[in-house]
Each structure stands twice: as C-alpha cells, then as structure tokens.
Image (spheres, rainbow, N blue to C red):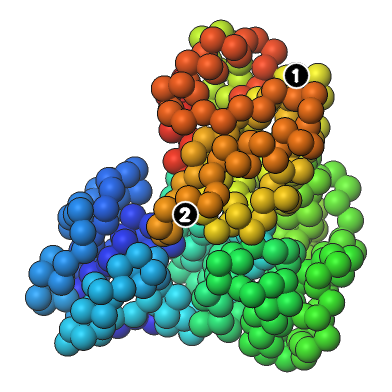
Amino acid sequence: MIDFKKIHFIGIGGIGVSAIARMMLAEGKRVSGSDFTDSEIVAGLRKAGAKIKIVTEQKAEDIPKDADLIIYSTAIEVADPKFFKELKSLKIPAISYAEALSEISKDKFTIAISGTHGKTTTTGMIAKILMDAGFRPSVIIGSLLKEVDSNFVFGESEYLVIEVDEYQRKFLSVSPKILVINNIDEDHLDYFKDLADIQSAFAEFAGRVPEDGVIITDFSHKNIGPVADVVGAMMVDFNSLPIDGLKLKFPGEHNRQNARAALAVASALGIRLDKAINSLNQFSGTWRRFEYLGKTKTGALVYDDYAHNPQKIRAVLSGAREFFPKKRIIAVFQPHLYSRTKTLLNEFAKSFDNADVIILVPIFPAREKHDPTISSKILTEEIKKNYKDKKVESMTSSAEIEKFLNDECKEGDVILTIGAGDVYKIAEAIL
C-alpha cells in the first residue's frame, strides 16, 4: 500500500509505470509526471487527472517541490545515470517501478504471471476469468486489455493480478501467492550471463512463493527443471487441464498454452472449468498481440504483434499460418535492442519459416547506444542464408517500406508488423 498523497512519475508513459499512475489516480491521489514522448497512454492519464510534462531531457527542477514520492522507470538508471544519481540525492523519497509494485502487492492476494514470453496474454486471460467470476481483481498488465481499453483495472477485492518482468531480476520485489511461469528461454542477454543465470533468477522468484501457495508451469518445458528442484510450494502442470470446448478468437499453440496456464489459475481459485473456458472464448485479447488492425486499399489484411525474440516470432508466424494456411504472409520485423539482435543473431535468422516475404526495419535501440557491429542489414544477410527461396530485404526508411507494402500487397495477402519498438506505426500508416 502506497500511503503518499502527491506522487510524481518519471517515465509515466511506460506501460508498467502508467498502470501504477492509474491506480494512484483511482485511489484519489494527486499524480504528476514526465516523459519524452506523448502517446495515447499519456493522453489517457491526462484525461484521468494527471499533470504531465513532455520533456527533451529529465531534470530535477521538473519535479514538483511538494511531491511526497517519486516513482521512476528503471530505464532511467541505464539511459541517464547522471540524472539518476541526482534523483537519488533529493530529499523526496524515490523508488523504482518494481519497488512500487512490491509495496502495492504486499497486502494483496497476488497472482503473478512470469516467463520469457506469453506473459501479457496470459495475464489478460486470467483477468478476464476473474472479472467474469466476480472476483473484482485489480490488474496491472503490460499492454492494453481490450475489455477495458486500459493497462490497469481497479478492483475492490484483495486479489491483484500482475504481469512481472525477469529483466534485471525486477520480479524479485514481489512475493506472489500464485505464480505462473509460462516458460524460460534465453533473452535479455545484455543483463543475464546465460540461460543458467536466467534459470537461477526464476528459481529465486519461485522460492518467494509461500508453502501454502501454488506455482503453475509447464512440466514438459526443457528449461523448467532447475526451478522445480528448489521450490517448497505446490507445483501444478498446466498441461494436466483439459481444454475441451476452448475456441479462442486468435490462433496458435502458444495461445492455447497461455489458456492452459490461465485455466490452472482458475482451478486453483475454485472457479469451475466450464465457466473459465467460456470466459476465454469471449476474450478479445490485448493491444499488439496478433491484433487485427484493418484492410489496406488493395485488400491486404494488416495485423500487428509485439514479438521481439526468436521464440515469439516463430510462435506468432506459426499462429498466422494456422489462421491463414493459403495466404501470402509478409512479415515486417523491427529488431529490438542491438544487444538482443547480436547475441541471438543465429536464432533470429531461423525464425521465419512461416513467412513468405521478410522485410527488416532498422533496429529499435530503446535504452541502448548505437552499436556499429550489428544492424538489420547484417541480420538480413543471415536470414537469406536460411531462406534462399524467400524474398528477404532490409529497408531503411518508413516511407520506403510503406511504398513497398502499398505497391506489392494485394487481396489475399496478410501483412504482419512484428517488434517491440514503433513498427506498428508502419501498419497504421498503410491503413
């Protein structure tokens, strides 16, 4: 529980930070904040009563003098260490998003959803089931839940459903009663040393679940073993639940796995399986997760997905092929982070089996400085080695990509923009 009345958020437009800002607004607190870019999320917060300033750089003088607490995005630590040092020297207490999440979840029955991929969709599914079952949960999710068009749901019960991130071991600030671990794969290798290091973080997180809690995971997943070896809480294999009658609105085995995890949570809470399956069949999904955006003037269908590591790309393209077995699939992929692209280059280069045409957008750097030793052009050449029969191109500007898509794509084609950066803007532009 955060008792402060006047809270300032740095990086307020971020998907996680903005959810906490919404929660504070819903509790009647005064909220201010700053960010580098305006967005729909920022506009929504303003409409809800937050005072937000768009800045070119973060400065201590932009923080209201009467603020009781500062909550900051952890990206600040990496992106602007000088400002971060100044921030920590202020008399106003400053805590990270993860630390704020810890305070919020302390007095709640917390259901945490983790894993290298599938977290957001699984969180949305669990939220939908609990809302339909009358549990009135609060929800913090890493996207916009379509049922409420928000990344935050204000509930009036003790239940809190949260999506948690393994990067920098942020999730270790939370002690959940029910923990979902969808999967464990290599990612964030700019922080973790290797897969064993990632597994150790998940094992430590699983160890935070009390003995009377529940850990829900996939016993068949090759990388789960080290986690199962150290936990004291009951573990449940979500593959043990039947999914007869499940008819999701979106395709892919990865989404059926997400549904199994959500159903296992429902079962742990005593919700009838048939009612939970009925909720999932009505679930509309989340923003940027195989999201249908519309049709181009020439009749091509346009979808967008947040996938940004090799496993996610393979999963979304496999789902797209399942949905559209005979259509031509044009994948427009924007790599996210120089470090991720470099360390997973070989895996990325083998991830496009179910695409017919592959277009590469320049790397989205996010928190990182330019690295001249890796580029989308380098990745393009590696992809070509594995897919000699496919059209694979690297394009440097949005205008060039938009022209190609408008000229080349027609009725019967599916355009899928993929990536965690701003590649979705290309999809919006061609519509």
Q: Relative to residue 429, is residue 57 depicted above or below?
A: below
Position of residue 406 in the picture relative to residue 322 (left or right)? left
Q: Which amino acid type is shown beneath numbered disc 1?
A: Lys
- Residue 298: x percent and y percent? 56, 8
Tell us which disc is closer to us: 1 or 2: 2
Examine the rendering and report whether any part of residue 144 can be seen.
no
Q: Nearer the viewer, residue 14 or 397?
A: 397
Q: Nearer the viewer, residue 286 or 241?
A: 286
Q: Which mark is residue 371?
A: 2
Q: Which mark is residue 327?
A: 1
Q: Which amino acid type is shown beneath numbered disc 2?
A: Asp
Q: Label 2: few (<14), some or many (≥20) within 10 Å? A: few
Quadrant of the rendered image containing residue 62: bottom left
Q: Relative to residue 306, is residue 201 depicted above or below?
A: below
The mark nearer the N terminus, 1 or 2, is: 1
Examine the rendering and report whether any part of residue 372 can be seen.
yes
Q: CA distance from mark 1 to mark 2?
A: 37 Å
- Residue 21: x percent and y percent? 33, 64
Q: How many marks?
A: 2
- Residue 407: x percent and y percent? 54, 10
Q: Residue at x 77, y 80 (%)?
A: 227
Q: Residue at x 61, y 66 (%)?
A: 189
Position of residue 17 in the picture relative to residue 212 (left or right)? left
Quadrant of the rendered image containing residue 389: top right
Quadrant of the rendered image containing residue 169: bottom right
Position of residue 274 in the picture relative to residue 33 (left or right)? right
Q: Quadrant of the N terminus?
A: bottom left
Check whether the beta carbons of the residues at disc 1 and disc 2 lie within 8 A of each other.
no
Q: Label 1: few (<14), some or many (≥20) within 10 Å? A: some
The local secondary structure at tag 1 comes to: loop
Q: Relative to residue 172, is residue 245 depicted above or below?
A: above
Q: Residue at x 47, y 54 (%)?
A: 371
